[in-house]
Image (cartoon, rainbow, N blue to C red):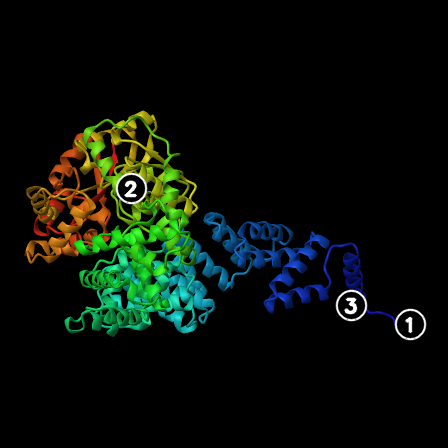
């Protein structure tokens, strides 16, 4: 007899029949399909999981589970646009599921849609009030929105709900750091690390916090740990470069070598010249270099050179640095000048070992980058001529020169200047040398032909300045520090504490920017990479410099930057206005700086911002004396004359010249020429600059350099007015080296 079903059993059976019917009608995946998808996802079989999830969304388009998993898969692989679509679909299909709103919030945060992210995360919390992860991510989003008090509250709520969850401790630490509550930030970040020792981001932010607290040794250690845990964390690598920039090591620490190599070789996170002094201060404590630089172990003959090359082969960090920027150290320069001379003199007496080729490659790249600033004896000049002839004769016989001969020549002369460069097949063995010394300079000649020109340059001084930079594009560089993410004008103004006289400029979302005097592109590329949604016009007198800048712009994949040859005096022909104009190190090389500055002011929109860089009279007293000496001696600006005068300065015991010999610009030919051989130079004091600003209808907004700002506050006290140029003038009189580079300041058009 058939068993009679209870009411409860009838309900269960009805539900099963309904579910089966829904499955058959294509409305819901089976338990087996759901479990398989979960298994794939949890086991890290992401490719299989994606295929199955896509299949489920095609078979059951109105069921949220496949979309939800797809959103997670796309998000973790950085495909945020696809993740957004999947998560939005999941939310529509399952509006009461807190986790779908949470996933959507994370994706919106990754896409920079912060207000929408906040809304989604708050909805997740409404649906699930004890959702610790949602509170944590809401805190992170609120932090990015600058709502620090709300961010702190949200993070603390997450910690209350889930005390052993590392991420909200980290997010709280980030928020507290933004609030300058540094000791509390340190405690939160250390808690996050205690809970999750491999939390690279927490180590990085701890380093950032410790650096702000002035505890540089600990900051370096935290940064190094972050980079070790995650070499791809570019923010940590970039911050490490900032932290060590002004640090000088007092002892050897080979454990830092891999960190420094990563800093130099991964992307464009630091400008090698900015960290060169720090790296060299570390390397000079290394027993290998220390031994080579002692007088008793001076390298004097071929045997000692060979031994030195073998020893230096064990220091790849030194080789990496030498290949990227001029080496700003006279002791090491003396070592390499001597080694180069001995190798040239004895070129037929040694074999081409791998170590020697590696050293010669490094030396040739160093000498090309410093534009052959190293001193040469008359004997060396004759031997180089002989080496040129020998290589030319080999090629005429359809024979390739020896690689050691070619690299030796490359350490004295730029190879692309020779008529035989196209025949140098032997250089195919060393692609870096071929690219840097031949292919890139030749590419610049082609690029220069296509750069648009605005009118004819007619000003006499402008023509002389142009000629200087055509001969010596300034400066030659390989890598630079590109911002890790683009930010708004408001972010920039807040970061450097500008005092705006109208806040409206902060609302400009797509700024038009003019770089008046872009040189070889470091400035223009940095700016084009910094401001969100910006379009940048980079202008310079020199086609050689512009071609270098345009080549590097293309190499870095920037498409918001255009180049134009023009004299600032002719820029009124543009008939354009700009939200931001930056002109650093340019106006003081004009015949009449105020005439150029007035043209730029007329191109600036009302309430627009202008960044200006001018030389300080007080900071350049020693350079003025050097320029006077050059004039008295009648020293010209040929490469040979500049090298010889530089060598006389190196040999001089004059106390006033010591500072000049430590200037970074002393170590390459174009920067040396700019420093002491420039055809035109004006210098200013801050009282004169105030008069200029008043005459142009501009208001001072603040200096850019944070170290100088810190020194000012230490001099006057924490509450002092950092926007008072009269106070700054008094400060500089007491600290004449404060603006050793130049004044770099912001002003606003009324």
* Dot 1 crowding, Cα within 10 Å, few <14, some 14–19, many 20+: few
Q: Position of residue 562 (x, y in %)?
A: 38, 37
Q: On residue 515, which mark appears?
A: none
- What residue is drawn where x is 24% and y is 64%? 280
Q: Which residue is mark 1?
A: 2
Q: Position of residue 541 (x, y in %)?
A: 28, 35
Question: For the residues carrying marks 2 and 3, which lies nearer the camera in this image?
Answer: 2
Q: Which residue is mark 2?
A: 519
* Closer-to-camera residue (194/422): 422
- What residue is drawn where x is 13% and y is 52%? 737
Question: SS at mark 1?
Answer: loop
Q: On residue 8, which mark appears?
A: 3
- Real-space Cα distance between discs 2 and 3? 83 Å
Q: Earlier in the sequence, mark 2 or mark 3?
A: 3
- What residue is drawn where x is 27% and y is 31%? 567
- Real-space Cα distance between discs 1 and 3? 17 Å
Whether residue 714 sits left or right of residue 122 in the image: it is left
């Amino acid at each position: 007899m058939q068993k009679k079903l209870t009411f409860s059993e009838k309900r269960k059976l009805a539900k099963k029949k309904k579910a089966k019917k829904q499955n058959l009608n294509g409305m819901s995946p089976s338990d087996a399909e759901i479990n398989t998808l979960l298994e794939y996802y949890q086991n890290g079989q992401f490719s299989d999981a994606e295929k199955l999830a896509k299949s489920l969304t095609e078979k059951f388009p109105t069921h949220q589970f496949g979309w939800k998993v797809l959103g997670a898969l796309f998000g973790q692989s950085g495909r945020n646009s696809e993740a957004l679509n999947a998560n939005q679909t999941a939310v529509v299909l399952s509006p009461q599921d807190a986790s779908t709103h949470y996933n959507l919030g994370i994706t919106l945060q990754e896409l920079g849609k912060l207000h929408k992210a906040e809304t989604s995360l708050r909805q997740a919390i409404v649906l699930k009030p004890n959702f610790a992860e949602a509170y944590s991510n809401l805190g992170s989003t609120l932090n990015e929105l600058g709502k620090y008090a709300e961010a702190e509250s949200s993070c603390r709520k997450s910690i209350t709900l889930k005390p052993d969850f590392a991420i909200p401790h980290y997010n709280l630490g980030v928020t507290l750091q933004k609030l300058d509550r540094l000791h509390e930030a340190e405690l939160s970040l250390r808690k996050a690390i205690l809970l999750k020792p491999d939390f690279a981001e927490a180590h990085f932010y701890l380093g950032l916090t410790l650096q702000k607290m002035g505890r540089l040794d600990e900051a370096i250690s935290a940064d190094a740990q972050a980079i070790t845990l995650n070499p791809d964390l570019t923010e940590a690598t970039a911050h490490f470069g900032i932290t060590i920039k002004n640090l000088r090591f007092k002892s050897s620490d080979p454990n830092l070598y891999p960190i420094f190599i990563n800093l130099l070789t991964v992307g464009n996170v630091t400008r090698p010249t900015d960290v060169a002094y720090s790296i060299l201060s570390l390397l000079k404590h290394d027993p290998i270099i220390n031994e080579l630089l002692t007088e008793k172990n001076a390298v004097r003959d071929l045997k000692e050179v060979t031994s030195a090359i073998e020893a230096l082969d064990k220091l790849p960090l030194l080789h990496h640095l030498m290949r990227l920027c001029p080496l700003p150290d006279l002791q090491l320069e003396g070592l390499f000048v001597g080694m180069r001379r001995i190798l040239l003199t004895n070129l037929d007496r040694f074999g081409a070992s791998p170590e020697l080729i590696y050293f010669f490659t490094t030396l040739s790249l160093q000498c090309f980058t410093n534009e052959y600033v190293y001193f040469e004896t008359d004997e060396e000049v004759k031997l180089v001529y002989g080496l040129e002839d020998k290589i030319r004769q080999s090629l005429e016989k359809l024979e390739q020169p020896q690689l050691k001969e070619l690299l030796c020549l490359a350490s004295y002369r730029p190879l692309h200047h020779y008529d035989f460069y196209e025949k140098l097949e032997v250089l195919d063995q060393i692609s870096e040398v071929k690219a840097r010394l031949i292919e890139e300079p030749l590419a610049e000649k082609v690029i220069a032909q296509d750069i648009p020109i605005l009118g004819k340059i007619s000003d006499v001084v402008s023509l002389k300045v142009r000629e200087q930079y055509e001969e010596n594009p300034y400066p030659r560089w390989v890598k630079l520090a590109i911002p890790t993410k683009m930010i708004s004008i408001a972010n920039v103004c807040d970061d450097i504490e500008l005092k705006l006289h109208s806040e409206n400029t902060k609302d400009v979302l797509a700024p038009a920017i003019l770089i008046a005097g872009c040189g070889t592109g470091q400035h223009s590329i940095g700016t084009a990479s910094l401001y969100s949604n910006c379009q940048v016009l980079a202008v310079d007198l020199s086609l050689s410099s512009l071609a270098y800048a345009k080549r590097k712009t293309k190499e870095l994949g920037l498409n918001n930057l255009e180049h134009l040859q023009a004299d600032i005096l002719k820029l009124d022909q543009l008939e354009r206005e700009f939200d931001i104009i930056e002109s650093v190190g340019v106006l003081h090389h004009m015949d009449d700086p105020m005439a150029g500055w007035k043209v730029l002011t007329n191109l600036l929109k009302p309430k627009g911002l202008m960044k200006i860089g001018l030389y300080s009279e007080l900071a350049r007293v020693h350079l003025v004396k050097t320029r006077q000496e050059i004039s008295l001696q009648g020293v010209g600006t040929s490469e040979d004359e500049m090298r010889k005068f530089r060598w006389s300065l190196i040999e001089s015991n004059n106390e006033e010249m010591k500072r000049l010999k430590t200037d970074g610009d002393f170590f390459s030919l174009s920067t040396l020429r700019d420093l002491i051989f420039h055809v035109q130079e004006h210098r200013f004091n801050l009282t004169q600059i105030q008069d200029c600003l008043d005459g142009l209808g501009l208001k001072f907004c603040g200096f850019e350099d944070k170290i100088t700002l810190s020194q000012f506050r230490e001099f006057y006290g924490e509450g002092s007015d950092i926007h008072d140029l009269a106070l700054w003038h008094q400060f500089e009189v007491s600290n004449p080296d404060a603006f050793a580079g130049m004044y770099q300041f912001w002003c606003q058009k009324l």
